[in-house]
Amino acid sequence: MKKQCRPDPIGEMEFTYYAVDLPSSLKALKIAPTPDIHFGNPSCSLRHLYQHIEYIRSDPEMFTFLNGDMIESVTRYSKGEIHKQATSPGKQRDFIIKLFLPIKKKVLGVTQGNHERRIEDVDVASDIAEALGVPYRAEGMLLKISFGSGNSGHDEKPYVYWGYFTHGYGGARTKSAKAVKVERTGQWLHADFYVMSHDHVVNVAPDIYLLPDNRTHIDSATGFKVGKLKAHRKILVKTNSFLKWGGYAEAGGFPPSDLTTPIIILDGTGKKRVRVEV
């Protein structure tokens, strides 16, 4: 009998990332995520949403990512008050498409939230991404973002950052319990920043892990070949929602949400650096 090869565990873990190439003229890139709009919910703050979109539209360096729960999508078989939502899930989807079409070139991608998953047989988040002509991955998306020039002193070399976006999952009461979800995600795959939504509470934290440098040299004291570890800084971001306090949140004892999204800033001059404004 021919000896069989052991299955490759690494091959089983592969999935597709998306790459976006943005203008070489950019000196910085700003990302204002758009999470948890919940359009259709009577507590959705359209005023803050319109201001958010105009803020993105007016800044050449600003882009966004639609990170799930864009619509309320209450059905007969789901949680929520079906008779209080503003309109049907199909019309909620159409509203989001119409809202973001004027800035579709600034939308980096779309993920699916638990509210979109309420609808069986139709993926409304996919419909939104298709209408805008942007990448879509339901569970989460790893993005390779290239922009600018002059990286490492080379005129033609762009700055490259890796970001992971996912809607999020589960319930949590305390800020620490909500924040630890994105911390766990940051342990599973490599990126410069990680963005998770769902919990409607903003939290930003830097974290460090160590990467071995392939370069080695002979240590003069011991004669052994040695190398160094380099610290890699990653930024963990939990995002806001566009829901005013009241209704389900108030009745369930959840705190008010910050209605202003954190801004992720990727430097395009000097050394690579990720910063976040809240």
Image: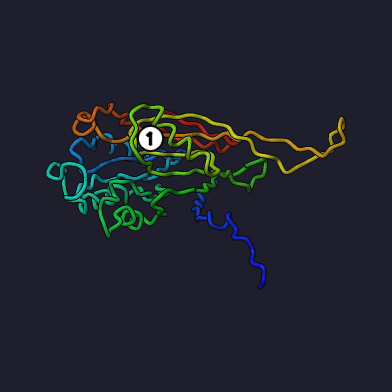
In this picture, is 12 found above or below 35?
below
Specify the amino acid type for callout 1.
Thr
Placement of the N terminus among the 4 image quadrants: bottom right
User: Outermost residue toward the left?
Assistant: 83
Residue at (19, 29) in percent of width and height: 251
Q: Position of residue 124 (x, y in %)?
A: 29, 54
Toward which corner of the image does residue 147 lie, by quadrant? top right
Q: Is residue 278 left or right of residue 242?
A: right
Q: Nearer the viewer, residue 70 or 176?
A: 176
Residue at left offset 59%, top offset 44%: 149
Q: Nearer the viewer, residue 70 or 50?
A: 70
Task: Give 198 or 78, whichever is nearer the viewer.
Answer: 78
Horizontal side of residue 136 vs 256, given as left or right: right
- Extreme residue in the front direction: 1
Indicate the quadrant containing the C terminus: top left, top right, bottom left or bottom right: top left
For residue 262, what is the image quadrant?
top left
Q: Residues within 10 Å of mark 1 (few under 14, many from 20)?
A: many
Location of residue 136 in the rendering, given as x and y in whole percent from the top left corner:
40, 54
- 116 or 55, nearer to the observer: 116
- At which x and y percent is residue 130? 35, 58
Q: Is disc 1 placed on a helix, strand or loop? A: loop
Q: Quadrant of residue 213?
A: top right
> How many callouts does the rendering have?
1
User: Which residue does the numbered mark 1 point to in the structure image?
Assistant: 239
**In the image, is 37 to the left or to the right of 230?**
left
